[in-house]
Each structure stands twice: as structure tokens, then as C-alpha cells.
Image (spheres, helix red, strand yellow):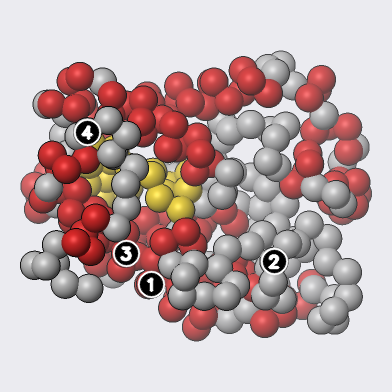
């Protein structure tokens, strides 16, 4: 397959792909418990996998994925899950390691630091000549941080009139009307993605019999029912919509310049020349 990862390419390769399609995808994830059967980098692996698929099928490049920097005391299984003590036990860690007073920054400070980091990344992408920067959130809570950073960045006068437009996307949110089980945590949806992208990191034999207790797994579709085929199907479906969104933003940038309009989605459906 075509190499689209920015860090793996030489300058002339980057320039050629950027000229052809000036979009860069930035995968956002974390290091978090995803059951006994999945790798802890599951969210980031999925975000990068979707980003690479979009770039290969629709053009553009993919920045290195971001595993770090998000809040470690909020929206994290190790910190807030009902069975967090069982998760800690399996990781052979004290549960109190994830309590707020064990961290140098408060929850608010961690959120602010991450917000600044995301804006900084967008500014870096802009300086490297891209016309559209897309955050791909693999860890679902990060979509809110990504959208906040996008709004902040797009509000800059330079970016708005002369620089780069930014957008943020969450895979299942684009296609949840097509699937009953869209989006979960380490259950059938995410496990299927991992089986499609990095099957060597998944071990379904680590799961108990179907119907028995699962630690740190949330979702309607049992992970035992996951399959690489389903993962490929849903990733392809999400990528198809992302590419339509990206194409519309590149071709009709002015539509997204208005206050609060940069996060609007589905506007391409109104263009008769775009089809479905």
C-alpha cells in the first residue's frame, strides 16, 4: 500500500502528496485499559488506522499519532470505571495511582495543557503548508478537546483568511445511523477494528466464555463476536464519509468560515454535483 505517514517520507514525496491533496490527518489517542484481550494503545491504533485509510483512498498525509498529553484523571478507565480496582489489580498497580492528588496538575490544568498542545500541533501543520488539518479522535472523550481546539484555531484571523482550516472527527459518529452497535469500549466494535488493523495485538483467548463478567469492557456487541471482516467494513464506511467531508472543505472552504460553521458536517450532501 502507498506510504502516507509523514515521518516516513522524504521531502520530495511529501511535497508531491501535499500538492495533490493538501490535507493532514492527526490521530489522537491514549494509553488505556481495553480489556484483557486488546492492547492498551487500542484507541490510537484505531485513529491512525482510519487516518491512513483516508489518506490512501482520498489523498493527503498522516502525522505521527499522539498517545500522550490528555487528562489522566478524567474519562479514563483506570481512573473512573466502576471496576477500576479490578483493572488496577490486573495491571498489578495500586488503584490510587490514578487519583487526582497523585498528579502534578489538576484536572482543569491537564485539560488546558492538552488544549494548548492541540492548537500547537495545528499551527505546526499550518506552517508545513497544509490547507486542512483533521484531528481523528480514537479515544472518544478527546473529540470534545479536539473540537474546542479546532474552534479556537479557526478563529485566528491568519488561519481564517490566509492559513489552514481545521476539523475534528470521531469514527463511529459519522456512521452510527447504519449500525446498531456503533462505538463501544473494548467490546465488539473496537475489537473488530483491532483485528482488522493489528490482529497480532489481539488475543480473544484471553476472554472468558460469552456472558461471563468482563473487566473494563463496555458495549452492546460482545467482544467474542468481533471479526476482522466487520472491522474492515466499518472502517471503510467511516473513511468514505471522512473523505467526502475533507473534499468539500478543500473545495468550498468559504462555507466553513462563518462563526461556528467549521464543525458543521454533512454539507456535502446538499451539493448536487457531489452525489452520495
Identity of the residue drawn at 32% across and 52% down: 265
Q: Are marks 3 and 1 in contact (CB under 8 Å)?
A: yes
Which residue corresponds to mark 4? Answer: 258
Instruction: Specify whether residue 259 is in view.
Output: yes
Looking at the image, which is closer to me, 265 or 22? Answer: 265
Which residue corresponds to mark 3? Answer: 241
Q: Do the residues labelled 3 and 4 touch (CB within 8 Å)?
A: no
Would you say 110 lies left or right of 53 here? right
Would you say 117 lies left or right of 212 here? left
Chain-order first, disc 2 or disc 1: 2
Instruction: Specify whether residue 22 is in view.
Output: no
Identity of the residue drawn at 19% across and 48% down: 249
Looking at the image, which is closer to me, 23 or 182? Answer: 182
Depth check, mark 1 against mark 4: the one in front is 4
Which residue corresponds to mark 2? Answer: 219
Report, in whole angstroms, how far the alpha carbon at label 2 lies from the one at label 4: 37 Å
Chain-order first, disc 3 or disc 4: 3
Chain-order first, disc 1 or disc 4: 1
Chain-order first, disc 3 or disc 2: 2
Amino acid at each position: 500500500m502507498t506510504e502516507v505517514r509523514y515521518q516516513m517520507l522524504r521531502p520530495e514525496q511529501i511535497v508531491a502528496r501535499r500538492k495533490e491533496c493538501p490535507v493532514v490527518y492527526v490521530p489522537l489517542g491514549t494509553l488505556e485499559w481495553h480489556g484483557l484481550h486488546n492492547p492498551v494503545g487500542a484507541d490510537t491504533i484505531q485513529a491512525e488506522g482510519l487516518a491512513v485509510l483516508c489518506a490512501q483512498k482520498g489523498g493527503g498525509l498522516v502525522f505521527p499519532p499522539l498517545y500522550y498529553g490528555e487528562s489522566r484523571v478524567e474519562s479514563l478507565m483506570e481512573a473512573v470505571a466502576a471496576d477500576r480496582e479490578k483493572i488496577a489489580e490486573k495491571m498489578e498497580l495500586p488503584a490510587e495511582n490514578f487519583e487526582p492528588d497523585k498528579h502534578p496538575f489538576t484536572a482543569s490544568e491537564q485539560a488546558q495543557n492538552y488544549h494548548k498542545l492541540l492548537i500547537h500541533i495545528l499551527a505546526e501543520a499550518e506552517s508545513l503548508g497544509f490547507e486542512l488539518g483533521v484531528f481523528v479522535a480514537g479515544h472518544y472523550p478527546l473529540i470534545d478537546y479536539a473540537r474546542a481546539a479546532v474552534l479556537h484555531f479557526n478563529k485566528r484571523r491568519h488561519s481564517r483568511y490566509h492559513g489552514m482550516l481545521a476539523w475534528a472527527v470521531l469514527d463511529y459518529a459519522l456512521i452510527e445511523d447504519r449500525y446498531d452497535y456503533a462505538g463501544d469500549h473494548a467490546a465488539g466494535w473496537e475489537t473488530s477494528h483491532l483485528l482488522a488493523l493489528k490482529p497480532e495485538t489481539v488475543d480473544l483467548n484471553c476472554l472468558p466464555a460469552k456472558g461471563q463478567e468482563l473487566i473494563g469492557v463496555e458495549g452492546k456487541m460482545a467482544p467474542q463476536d468481533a471479526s476482522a471482516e466487520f472491522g474492515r467494513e466499518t472502517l471503510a464506511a467511516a473513511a468514505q464519509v471522512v473523505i467526502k467531508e475533507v473534499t468539500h472543505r478543500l473545495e468550498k472552504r468559504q462555507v466553513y468560515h462563518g462563526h461556528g460553521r467549521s464543525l458543521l458536517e454533512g454539507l456535502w450532501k446538499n451539493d448536487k454535483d457531489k452525489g452520495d
